[in-house]
Amino acid sequence: MTDTPADDLTASFRSDVTVELVKHTASDADVLFAARVSTLGEQSLEELEKEPGRSRGLINYLMRDRHGSPFEHNSMTFFVSAPIFVMREFMRHRVGWSYNEESGRYRQLEPVFYVPGADRKLVQQGRPGKYEFVEGTAEQQETVTRTMTEAYQEAYRAYQEMLAAGVAREVARAVLPVGLFSSMYATCNARSLMHFLGLRTKHELARVPSFPQREIEMVAEQMEQSWAKLMPLTYEAFNANGRVAP
Ligand SMILES: Cc1cc2nc3c(=O)[nH]c(=O)nc-3n(C[C@H](O)[C@H](O)[C@H](O)COP(=O)(O)OP(=O)(O)OC[C@H]3O[C@@H](n4cnc5c(N)ncnc54)[C@H](O)[C@@H]3O)c2cc1C
């Protein structure tokens, strides 16, 4: 770690997010052995391979009747790189999640900023809690890209000026905007992930509709894809039962 500010950093702009599953012990079998201890005690592990046809039914029953704890005996760790405003929303999810995020006190923050892509709907209509978003005009798109880019560059210039003057990183960072990218590791289990997905995705199968901000939904969608491959029966039951966490 150095206290010398890097002054050769040029700003870069992203319209996507990064989500990588870096570590996991998660499978449908983890749900089954945990659930079967109710009736089989210590033999539940041995029963895993028997009557696989019943596994789908058992997982669906647990999901439908909201017996949630068997879905906690697994673990997934994701690396996430996303704007700070996404991290703020994300860390509201307190239960069944562990977080570690990069520090703006111990390292100089890099000038990577979020600018919405051409497919990001820019105009909000409707009432709070039930917004609909529609395409922006070409002029609105241009205004967003230009003003964000200019504001980000000015903010980062001010940050660097303070660092060059010897001001502490933890003080200088106050000028940086929430569109700055941050990174974290987030560890969860299938139950806490399902709760997150139920709230942070807008999905046609959801029994309780949610209206998340698009950028956290982009993170959620990538997590969902990874999880679906690890626990296909659990994923199927989640969708079949209205995407409500058990
Ligand atoms: C579309 C959308 C809009 C939002 N808008 C806002 C907003 O305008 N302002 C704002 O502040 N937040 C907002 N939020 C955040 C929201 O209020 C929740 O903080 C966030 O979704 C995390 O949900 P959670 O508390 O259920 O999750 P977790 O913290 O993971 O909790 C999981 C579950 O554990 C139980 N639980 C956890 N803590 C407690 C507790 N202290 N007491 C009792 N039960 C508990 C609850 O059953 C809870 O559902 C919004 C969220 C969404 C999805």
Image (cartoon, grey):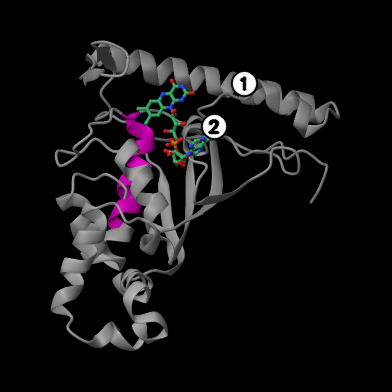
Q: Secondary structure at mark 2?
A: loop
Tag 1: amino acid: Ala
Question: What residue sits 33% from the left and 36% below the top?
Answer: 199
Tag 2: amino acid: Leu
Which dot, 1 or 2, sits closer to the camera? 2
Q: Are marks 1 and 2 in contact (CB under 8 Å)?
A: no
Q: Secondary structure at mark 1?
A: helix
Q: Quadrant of residue 106?
A: top right
Return the x and y of residue 6 as percentages of the image width and height: 72, 40
Question: What residue sits 25% from the left and 23% below the top?
Answer: 121
- Image position of 41 with respect to 240: above or below: below
Label placed on residue 124? none
- Image position of 245 with respect to 67: above or below: above
Residue located beneath label 2 in the image? 180
In primary-sequence order, the first of circles 1 and 2 is 1
Residue located beneath label 1 in the image? 155
Q: Quadrant of residue 171?
A: top right
Magenta residues, as a range?
A: 212-225
Query: What secondary structure is the magenta-colored segment mainly?
Result: helix
User: In the image, 109: left or right of 190?
Assistant: right
Return the x and y of residue 156 as percentages of the image width and height: 63, 26
Q: Extreme front residue here?
A: 39
Q: Nearer the viewer, residue 71 or 210?
A: 71
Determine if the magenta segment contains residue 114.
no
Q: Quadrant of ligand 1?
A: top left
